Every structure is written in C-alpha cells, then in structure tokens.
C-alpha cells in the first residue's frame, strides 16, 4: 500500500511530511530514552510518560493515513498497556524487545515518508513477538532469564546491527520566537542608524559637523551591528542534550554485545554549541564511547573481583569554559595499562626506549595512527584504534583532545571545542605581502627572534626563559620566497604538549574574523584550514595550527642536541607498525 498527497496539496503535503519527519524522530528518540530509563529505574511515572509518547506517535501517523505505522505502534501500545495493568513487569528481555520495535518503527516511518506504507515480513514477525510477549511474558524462542544475573545482559533478540544510525534530518534549526523578534528589531534599528549616517554625511559640509560627531554616529552603528551579529550567531546554537541522550541507547547495546553492564550518566545537557560543531563531534564521540566500553569497562566478574560495582559507569559532561565548550567522557574502568602500551611500542619499534617515557608521553602514543593494545582486531576497536581519528576530527574544528588516566580507576578524555565555526577571534601576522591568522586563544605571547638565528633555516630551537622552544619560519614552510626582514618576530603558540613558535615578518594584532571555506584548489594545502576577508578587502589565510605544531616538534627533534624520547622522525616507525598490523 502506498501513501500519497491528497489531491491538490502537493507542496503543502511535502511541508506536512517534513514536520511529521522531525516530530516522529523526536518521539522515537524519546521512546528509546524512556525505555532505558524505565529499565534502570522502573516506575509508574516513567511508564506513563512512555505510553504518552507512543500514543502521540500513533495519533500523528493515523492523522496522515499511515496505516501500517499506526498498526505497529498499536501493537507496542498493547504491550505497554500490559505493563500499566501490572500483568507484566519490567525486565531486560521486554525492554530489548521494545527497543527493537523502536528500530522497526523508525524504518516504517522512513518508508511511509517515501510513499511505501506497508508491513514487511520482518515487521510482521516482530509484531507477532510483541503480541506473544504480551500473552505469555516471553518472546518466542527467548531463553529464560537468569534471576542471579544483573539487568541488561540477557536478550530476547539480538539487534540486527550494533551501530549508531546517523541522522537524516535536513540542515535546519529551531529558533526561539523572542530571539527572532530581537533580530527583527535590531535589523530595523540598524537600518534607521544607517539612514541617519547617510544624511549626516550628505549634510556634514553645510551643517559644520565635527569629526567627533561622525565617530559618535559610527559607534552607535557598531554597537547595533555587534548586537545583531551576536543574536544571529545564537540562532545557530543548539543544546548538546539530544546528542548526549542519543548515546544512552548506544552504551546499552554495545555493552550488552560484550556481556558487560554499563550506564551512561549525562551532565550539562542544556549547554549550547554551534550546530555545525555539534554535528562534527558526533563521530569522534562515538569512537570514544566504543573504546571506553571495549577496553575501559571490565566484565561484571572482573569488576567485582576488583571491588567495584558490577555495572560500569560512564559520564558524559559538557560545560562552558571561557570562549569554548568542553566535553568530557569519563569511565570508571581499568584505565590505560601503560606497561601494555610500552610493550606494544617496543614490539613494533615505534619508540626507541619506551621504558624512559613518562606517563603523559605513553598516553600520547595512543594517538598514533593504527596504534592499539588489542591482541586481535574486533568490531570494537581497542583504546588507541580510532584515537588518531578523534584527534584529527577535533583539530579540524580548531579544538584539542586531552587524556587523563589512572590505572584501575578509569580514564577521562576531554574535548575542548570552539563555540562556533563561523567566526574566530584571531591574531593576524604578516609574511611578505600575505596575512595569516591563528585563533587568539592559542597565542601565549609574542617575542623577537634572536639575531643569531640563521635566516636560511626553515626551523630551529631557541631559548624561552631557559626552556627550549622549537619554532618554524612560516615563510619557508609555505614556500613564499622573498627575503626576511632584519627583525623577525615569533608568535608563541600553546598546544597540549607544550609550546612552539612561528617566525613571521610582522605582527598585526587581534580582531574578529568571519571564516570562509577554502576553494577546491586549496582544500588540501598543508598548514591552511580556511580563509577570511580582511578589513582592507584582501584575503587572509587561517593557519592549521595542529599540523604546524607537529611539524615544528618533528623538526626540532632532528636538531643536534635536542633531547626527545620519541624516535625522529616518528612516521617511518608508525608506518612499519601499521604495515605489520595489516599483515596480522
């Protein structure tokens, strides 16, 4: 059976379907979260909330004539009604069955939106299981639950795929009406101020207006513009809660697939970040959760033997820190087994003397491409596999990744992210006739390059208050040519492992910059991540600071007398390691 638009309502029908698609996805996510909450803490209030969500979805589907979807929700409602009437009690097999039904509902919703409204064999089989469970308290073929085993391990049915399904929503955000009113008001005020400025300039000569009057007019317009910009930027801000709550199901299913128990606690769900940042952090966060569940959280037996609760706990936390959003994922698992990391580093020749590495340096090995302490490659990667992907993706957002672990106690991974990708508070510097920009939060200080430094060298090491500071000459790194001035400046940049310097011709100061994407010709240019329009109309390039930092550290490691525990360069050893991994 196919569904289609009522006669004469083509465009309007598509708009209705778009609204229903967003509403249905929200309701299905709410059902997942309510089921997981009900499993952890059964209660009438949670059950009533779950039933209301299902009933709302059924009503919306019915109003649009999606009969197959309506019938399926009705089958799930019957099982929930048995819970409400206490004919059944909350159990892990029942919750697993209902969570599987949410997956079927999601598929039926997408099919109905595509014009196919019918129950396939798989949907009918799942619907029959719902009815059988309601009648007997057990799904056909399900093993009897073990009363001595903790909740959330036994399953009436394995889910078809243990993966997070990416959102198919279009690029849209909801805007608060008050915020929209404020934008309209500011736009009108800015238009009025612009008219006053135009009249002022036209009448300035005849009226004898002073320069101070012109500056006052300009300052009024500047303030209105900044207010408007602030409101427009806030339109792009969305809370992290929906993304965080999405992972409640992820943690449950992935832990269950490994015979483990795990609960995810959320904190800071109302913290807002740019919608583009939120979407970009989705995959890195999934990598971290998978690693935490695979190599962080132990089995219930291992946890009890170590004096822990049999159920592992993960905490996903967000908070603002200055001009950044910080996302922390912590677990109370076994922590990083650093001796195992040293053993693998020695085995594959990644480090010359792993026993001399400090704990922080051992932890940094986990970010090497392909590094893993796992004895065998499985569907879930060990802590380390995927961490290079996490760092690459976060640094592409102008963010940073930090790791803190205590063996036997757990691990915390901290992502520091910008509030927005549209605007940057940047520090500009000049090399020849080109201007380059770095995020101001990375700039520690600016100093003069010592006169003794050779102008022909791309990189070097200088002293910064008695400490070695590796630096790069931006002119040589980017192949700009030309001759450096007699006096060069060094912009000292912070990074997770210390500081590095960029030698440039001149310092131009800080200011707010609107970020523009690079054209296709320049997208793969090393060391450049974006562009911006400068105040004089020229194009400035935004530097990819993580790439430049790593390059500076590697070049410094090659300098005579510079002491580093890591091999120099690292890439050849890492390449050998990855090649050996592929042959295993």
Image: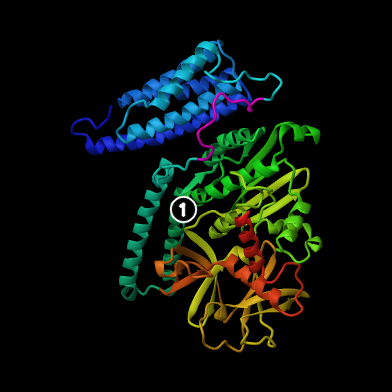
Residue 490: name its quadrant: bottom right
Residue at image coords 62%, 87%: 455
Residue 325 x/y as whole percent: 59, 51
- How packed mark 1 is, by other alpha carbons closer than 10 Å (few <14, some 14-19, many 20 or more), is some
Q: How many marks?
A: 1
Q: In this orientation, which residue lies closer to the viewer: 195 or 35?
A: 35
**Residue 394 visible in this rendered orientation of the protein:** yes
The residue that mark 1 highlights is: 233
Q: In this orientation, which residue lies closer to the viewer: 17 or 68?
A: 68
Q: Is residue 10 above or below residue 549?
A: above
Residue 151 x/y as whole percent: 65, 25
Q: Where's the N terminus, which quadrant?
A: top left
**Residue 57 visible in this rendered orientation of the protein:** no
Q: Residue furthest left?
A: 8
Q: Main secondary structure of the magenta part?
A: loop
Is residue 470 one of those drawn in magenta?
Answer: no
Q: Residue furthest front?
A: 583
Residue 473 x/y as whole percent: 60, 79
Residue 268: name its quadrant: top right
Q: Is residue 494 left or right of residue 195?
A: right
Residue 418: name its quadrant: bottom right
Report the magenta residues as a range: 151-164
What is the basis of the colouring in this image? rainbow
- Secondary structure beneath dot 1 equals helix
Residue at image coords 73%, 44%: 410
Q: Is residue 22 left or right of residue 541?
A: left
Q: Is residue 227 above or below residue 128?
A: below
Q: In this orientation, which residue lies closer to the viewer: 229 or 368?
A: 368
Residue at image coords 24%, 32%: 5
Is residue 157 one of those drawn in magenta?
Answer: yes
Residue 479 x/y as whole percent: 52, 80
């Amino acid at each position: 059976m196919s569904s289609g638009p009522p006669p004469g309502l083509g465009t309007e029908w598509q708009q209705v379907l778009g609204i229903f698609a967003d509403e249905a996805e929200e309701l299905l996510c709410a059902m997942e979260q309510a089921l997981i909450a009900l499993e952890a803490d059964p209660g009438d209030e949670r059950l009533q909330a779950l039933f209301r969500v299902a009933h709302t979805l059924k009503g919306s589907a019915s109003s649009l004539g999606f009969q197959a979807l309506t019938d399926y929700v009705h089958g799930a409602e019957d099982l929930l009604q048995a819970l409400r009437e206490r004919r059944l009690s909350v159990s892990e097999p029942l919750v697993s069955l209902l969570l599987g039904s949410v997956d079927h509902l999601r598929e039926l919703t997408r099919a109905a939106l595509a014009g196919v409204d019918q129950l396939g064999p798989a949907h009918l089989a799942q619907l029959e299981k719902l009815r059988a469970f309601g009648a007997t308290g057990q799904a056909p073929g399900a093993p009897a639950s073990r009363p001595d085993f903790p909740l959330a391990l036994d399953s009436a049915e394995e889910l078809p795929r243990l993966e997070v399904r990416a959102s198919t929503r279009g690029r849209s955000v909801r805007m608060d009406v008050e915020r929209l009113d404020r934008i309209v008001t500011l736009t009108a005020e800015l238009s009025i101020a612009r008219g006053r400025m135009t009249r002022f300039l036209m009448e300035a000569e005849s009226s004898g207006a002073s320069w101070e009057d012109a500056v006052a007019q300009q300052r009024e317009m500047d303030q209105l513009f900044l207010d408007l910009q602030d409101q427009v930027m806030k339109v792009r801000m969305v809370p992290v809660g929906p993304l965080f709550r999405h992972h409640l199901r992820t943690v449950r299913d992935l832990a269950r697939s490994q015979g483990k128990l795990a609960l995810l606690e959320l904190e800071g769900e109302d913290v807002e970040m740019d919608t583009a940042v939120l979407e970009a952090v989705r995959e890195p966060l999934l990598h971290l959760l998978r690693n935490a569940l695979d190599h962080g959280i132990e089995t219930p037996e291992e946890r009890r033997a170590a004096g822990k609760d049999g159920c592992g706990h993960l905490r996903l936390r967000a908070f603002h820190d200055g001009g950044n959003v910080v996302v922390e994922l912590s677990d109370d698992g076994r922590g990083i087994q650093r001796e195992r990391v040293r053993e693998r580093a020695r085995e594959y020749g990644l480090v010359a003397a792993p026993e001399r590495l400090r704990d922080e340096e051992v932890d940094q090995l986990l970010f090497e491409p392909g590094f893993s302490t796992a004895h065998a490659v499985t569907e879930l990667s060990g802590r380390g596999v995927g961490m290079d992907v996490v760092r690459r993706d976060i640094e592409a957002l102008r963010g940073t990744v930090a790791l803190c672990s205590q063996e036997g106690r757990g691990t915390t991974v901290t992502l520091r992210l910008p509030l927005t990708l549209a605007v940057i508070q940047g520090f500009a510097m000049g090399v020849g006739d080109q201007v380059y920009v770095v995020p101001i939060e990375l700039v520690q200080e600016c100093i003069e390059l010592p006169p003794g430094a050779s102008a022909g060298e791309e990189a070097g090491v200088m002293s910064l208050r008695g400490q070695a500071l590796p630096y790069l000459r931006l002119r040589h790194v980017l192949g700009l040519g030309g001759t450096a001035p007699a006096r060069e400046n060094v912009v000292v940049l912070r990074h997770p492992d210390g500081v590095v310097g960029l030698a440039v011709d001149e310092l131009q100061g800080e200011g707010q910059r609107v970020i523009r994407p690079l054209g296709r010709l320049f997208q793969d240019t090393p060391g450049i991540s974006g562009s911006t329009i400068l105040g004089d109309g020229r194009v400035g390039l935004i530097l990819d600071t993580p790439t430049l930092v790593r390059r500076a550290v590697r070049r410094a490691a090659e300098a005579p007398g510079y002491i580093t525990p890591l091999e120099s360069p690292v890439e050849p050893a890492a390449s050998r390691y990855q090649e050996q991994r592929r042959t295993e």
